[in-house]
Amino acid sequence: MLGQMQDWPLLVHKLIDHAALYHGDREVVTRSVEGPIHRTNYRQIHGRAKRIAKALDRRGFQLGDRIGTLAWNTWRHLETWYGIAGIGAVYHTLNPRLFPEQLVYIANHAEDRALFFDITFADIVAKIAPKIPSIKLYVAMTDREHLPKADIPNLVAYEDLIAEGDDDFTWKDFDENTACGLCYTSGTTGNPKGVLYSHRSNVLHGFIAGQADAMGLRNVDSILPVVPMFHANAWALAFAAPMTGAKLVMPGAKLDGPSICELLTTEKVTMTAAVPTVWLAALQYLEQSGTMLPHLKRVLIGGSACPRSMIETFEKKYGVQVVHAWGMTEMSPLGTLGTLKVGMDELPYEKQLDYKCKQGHAPFGVEMKIVNDENDELPRDGKAFGRLKVRGPCIAKGYFRGEGKDAFDEDDWFDTGDVATLDAQGYMTITDRAKDVIKSGGEWISTIEIENLAVGHPAVAEAAVIGVRHPKWDERPLLVIVLKKDQNATKEDLLKYLTGRIAKWWMPDDVVFVDEIPHTATGKIQKIILRQRFGDYRLPTIAAE
Ligand code: AMP
């Protein structure tokens, strides 16, 4: 027997319909790419998204067409997403931090038919345009006055598209499983692979994100997604905020400490989200300038492991709750969030911190398990670590064009490539990417744990641990350090600092100081480059053997 409830498809553009109708005056504020702060609201965004949909429809774009965006978080990018989704086309976010050749590969692989881009990327676009024959329309997300002079074919100004028609447009009708968004990830081996979100997965993911024990979004919140829309859907915020009618504050191109901290204050931001490197810079700025954060209540930190010292500084010095989160492009991206469970707020603060440093627990809609090399499930005892596998309605069941099949098994479990523990309370802790793990004498050493402890040293700005060849132990850890400006520390200082905090046999065999640690386009430490650089590094412990 079937239920007798309405078949109301979960379509992304219904979110902006809802926001316009019930929260129409709620502000969306942007530090525009052109410079000034721009203010609009959900009603206007809705109307303008319809104009974009109408302009695209009139030009023959249709269901399933991929339309690229190479853009910062702005109100126009939001309108573009909703406008594209409303005709059943697919917004394809391109990450501007990638090399031009990678952008060319990805846009060609996706067969993008149009590209919306911010004027800051005009030169890149001019360079790659001749190599992407499928793109028939280039839209500079600005007005005619700021239209770039670069040599870009079939170029129109966004505001001219908007002005072309009116907002009298009926969204197209289609199934909720229709493709809605596309984002390529370089997290796996080989070429970047496309993750193709559906309307249904995006809407469900918005519901999941908003839950009180997840991001806990409310209408009264003012939300600053520093995490870019081109990095895994801005962690659901572009959908979850209109769902609740929360104010959105979009940072545009300026993600540096002073610019972000200014917006946090002037726009009375209550909740924000970004990767740890952004907060590293922001916290340094706050410390130097003596600025406090009077409005901010919660900060979501994920994308790579959040150091303990960062959680402590936010919470103790600034009174801002940290929610440590883990996820992946393949998971829409939220996988776990580190809100405290019942009774934990009564624990001594250091014990609470132990939980907050873990990557968190899964909201409803994310199944997790850890397995050994034979694919046998391992105990949830907080000790055993193995490959983390996940499944759920917002998790990919394959990559675009059928690539990377090995990551998925016949029961839809997706192998995250992360190594983790699961504890009895349901908290997951990432110990490493499988490819970064150090195997010393047959035992695994967690590089993430050592890195997180090392950045707790007051002189350390950033730390990375990699495995270096060792004749007796196969691999031993090498600690790579970037010191804070005007600070000093020696190898001995750092090893002394780690003593007693990690197992003796995890202690790095050496420490090297560098000016900079390389990062990927999504802000993660590029260990592969470090491993190449220190490939022939001779550990002092070898001579001693
Ligand atoms: P991406 O798809 O670019 O978001 O990268 C996903 C990967 O980032 C995950 O598989 C993890 O290896 C890493 N990651 C994300 N969040 C965290 C976190 N909180 N702690 C440790 N690693 C993380």
Image (cartoon, rainbow, N blue to C red):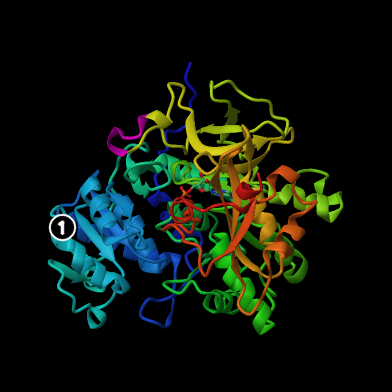
Q: Amino acid at mark 1?
A: Lys
The boundaries of the magenta stretch are 400-405
Label 1, on which residue?
A: 131
Image position, residue 339 (x, y; %) = 69, 49
Q: Nearer the viewer, residue 49 or 502?
A: 502
Q: Nearer the viewer, residue 450 or 129?
A: 450
Image position, residue 12 (x, y; %) = 40, 48
Q: Residue furthest top?
A: 1
Q: Nearer the viewer, residue 374 or 10?
A: 374
396 part of magenta stretch: no
Image position, residue 323 (x, y; %) = 66, 54
**Side of 282 relative to 81 (left or right):** right
User: Is disc 1 surrounded by few (<14), some (14 to 19) or many (20+) residues within 10 Å?
Assistant: some
Q: Quadrant of residue 463?
A: bottom right
Can residue 503 be seen from the camera position used here?
no
Q: Quadrant of residue 269?
A: bottom right
Relative to 52, say whether 448 is above or below.
Answer: above
- Secondary element under disc 1, as helix, strand or loop, is helix
Image position, residue 208 (x, y; %) = 56, 44
Which residue is drawn at the image coordinates 82% and 49% (left, top)? 351
